[in-house]
Image (cartoon, rainbow, N blue to C red):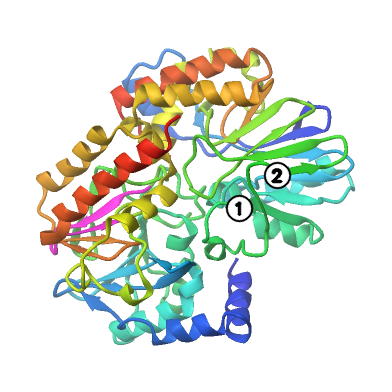
Amino acid sequence: MDRVGRERLAGLERGSGFVSTIQRARGPAASVPLTHDVSWIAENYPLGEGRNVHVSVFLIRAEEQNILIDSGSFYHRESLVRRISGVTAGEGIHSLILSHSDYPHSGNIPAFRRRWGDFEIVASSGEPEIQGLPYARRSRIGGSLEVAGRQIDFLDPPLADRSHTSWIYDRASRVLFVADGFGYHHAEDETGLTSRQLPDGFRSEEIYTFHRDTLIWLRYADPPVLMGVLREIFAEREVSWVAPIHGNPIAAEHLDDYLERLEAGVRRIVGEQAV
Amino acid sequence: MPREIHPGIHWIQEFGPDRPGIAKSLLDRGAHWYRPGREIHVPQNAFLFAGEQTLLFDTLSPAATDRILTDLEAVLDGRALDYLALSHPDVPHAGNTFRILERHPGAKLVAPGFGRTHELYHLEDAHKVGPGDSLDLGGKRLHFHDAAFLDAAMSMWMTEETSGMLLPVDWMGLPLMDGEGLLFADEFRSPVDEDRYAEFHGRVMFWLRYVDVARTQKEIDLVLETYRPRMIASAHGPVIRADVPHYFEMMKEVVERVATGGRTGVL
């Protein structure tokens, strides 16, 4: 996989992907601070027809250690290595917490380990070996772990597709890291912008298309049940930011607005895809 | 060793490690079919279709690289692998893709056409298929379909004409006890019933907890009506070769059980 990945990246630099490589190099800021010790390293993937999706990672700079949330896609490997090195002043990663093992989330683990050593990996799979992560420390959905001195809760995610996905709540910063739900099909010039920076806020259409195209099972959803469980999560804990791997981070003050648009999107998906 | 489940269709299985966590949960809730002390496994299945040409559907997980390469050699028996089709690019289903292609460099990679993120899975050069697409292997004719019950968005189901086989990938799987590997559902000593299916789907399709039950059950009826399968070959369960509608009724019960009882765990 890694060899092929390197060849693909080399091909992009030589061939038709030249423009997108340049765009990625210009890209957003090296990182976007969410709290004093949590930052967003935003990577963009163009879907065509003016739509884009983030395939990002987040960095927690704990006391003396750096925790990465997800490893990102091999598509962005060179950029991620450069930017993580820059943000951590060359320290790199000490722990990595995976939301789930899907390739765009876990595709850089071998490369990062070669660069920064055998850092700790925390994954919520019931059987890490089957997910290609035999060396991972297992987290339990619904449980908590101390990782690099931080108390991390692993939540059962209502908006996800893979069985072993967990949402990751960092108690110290009160940031909730989520995948694959809470995504957004953003415009290119919205890459790397948080909800506080989006000029006109979130658009309902792009919340709808993201969830329609990503969480296919939503066609069967019972919207009140789903949204009830989702809202309970936020009623039970204080959240400073919702930090989606595939979306623009949502500040606490914009969460109700996003949830309302999400609920409308789910109802639309259900209505349009009636059995 | 692989098992031939229909002339020219071979079942390759990764039995998977013992799962004491699942066994404990079965004991705790008093699952009637589970015998204390027995190992519990969640299998991964791959299927080789051999007509005049050959196609392998899925690759097993990276924990079973040697198994898939060895078993594939055995069933090919000197023939070439012409196609490698991935149901979806998840690690347990696609994790040996490049190892298989290294061993069989002439094989053409086939992947679901859904979505626009193939580059994120190294699938940009794969032959992409979707509903309405077919592949004639010569003596085996395959059709590709949208997956009705799935995890990853980029997924597909497949049917094979001569056997009447539906391959529903992550749907219709169940946990096995030791000794139950490569058995048809009608060969089990303990019953293959909705409780076993609910244990699996309450983990893999945990999202059934959030669905409209009647609507989802209606989709199950529609799947049966659309494909009218005579055999079912799931990626995680026993192959079903008789009384298929009975199992579809069980799956409707599973929807209700997960929607009301919630998630059973994680895989």
Mark number, residue B113 = 1
Task: Kindly identify the amino acid type of the residue bearing the numbered disc 1.
Answer: Gly
- In screen coordinates, is B176 left or right of A235? right
- In screen coordinates, is B134 left or right of A69? right
Which residue is at 14% across, 75% downward? Answer: A36
Task: Kindly identify the amino acid type of the residue bearing the numbered disc 2.
Answer: Asp
- In screen coordinates, is A137 left or right of B68? left
Which residue is at 11% across, 44% downward? Answer: A236
| A132 vs B260, nearest the viewer | B260
Q: Position of residue A118 (x, y in %)?
A: 42, 70
Q: Position of residue B163 (x, y in %)?
A: 76, 26
Which residue is at 70% across, 46% downward? Answer: B68
Q: CA distance from mark 2 to mark 1?
A: 10 Å
Which chain letter matches label 1?
B
Count neighbours of disc 2 (C-alpha within 10 A) and say few if under 14, some if 14 to 19, many if 20 or more: few
Count neighbours of disc 1 (C-alpha within 10 A) and say few if under 14, some if 14 to 19, many if 20 or more: many
Read off the residue under disc 2. B133
| A120 vs B161, nearest the viewer | B161
**Can see residue B118?**
yes
Q: Is residue A50 above or below residue A235?
A: below
Does the magenta-highlighted stretch encompass residue B57?
A: no
User: Mark 2 touching mark 1, by CB under 8 A?
Assistant: yes
